[in-house]
Image (spheres, rainbow, N blue to C red):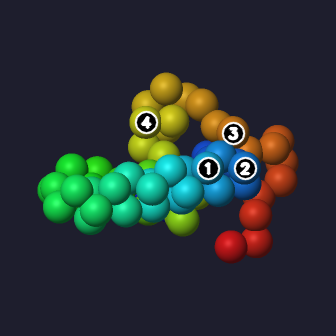
Amino acid sequence: MILKKNVGYIDSIIRVIVGALIVGLGLYFDSYWGFIGLIPVFSGAVSFCPIYRLLNMETTKPNIERAN
């Protein structure tokens, strides 16, 4: 199965930043909750969100996909 990109450029940047912040806070407070931050980091890095797929949403520009 090929995963069609459904996360736009700005959305993916925000996901990576927020995810990294959550991971950093988890490390700072020595909590396992920081692992939850890996989910937005991963979905931002691969530009695919399974929740968007379920809701039939996408934040990419129409007919334009990133070269990654």
**Between disc 4 and disc 1, whose residue precedes?**
1
Q: Earlier in the sequence, mark 3 or mark 4?
A: 4
What residue is drawn where x is 49% and y is 26%? 55
Label 2 neighbour load within 10 Å: few <14, some 14-19, many 20+:
few
Counting residues from the start of the chain, the first of labels 2 and 4 encountered is: 2
Q: CA distance from mark 4 to mark 1?
A: 16 Å
Which residue was labeled with disc 1? 14
Instruction: Answer whether labels 1 and 2 touch (C-beta < 8 Å).
Output: yes
**Which mark is on residue 10?**
2
As drawn, the residue found furthest toward the bottom would be 68
**Upstream in the sequence, badge 2 or badge 3?**
2
Coordinates of residue 11 in the picture (x, y in percent): 65, 46
Q: Quadrant of residue 23?
A: bottom left
Coordinates of residue 43 in the picture (x, y in percent): 48, 55
**Label 2, label 3: how many angstroms apart (C-alpha)?**
9 Å
Residue 5 in view here:
no
Residue 51: assigned label: 4
Task: Categorize mark 3 by other alpha carbons within 10 Å: few (<14), some (14-19), many (20+).
Answer: some
The kind of residue on which mark 1 rests is Ile
Q: Could you tell me how far apart the alpha carbons at marks 3 and 4 are, in whole angstroms?
A: 12 Å
- Secondary structure under tag 2 reads helix
Identify which amino acid the numbered label 4 is placed on: Ile
Residue 13 falls left or right of residue 27: right
Where is mark 3, residue-wise?
59
- Which element carries disc 3, helix, strand or loop? loop
Residue displayed at 77% across by 58% down: 65
Q: Residue at x 76, y 64 (%)?
A: 66
Tag 2 and tag 4, C-beta contact below 8 Å: no
| Element at label 1 | helix
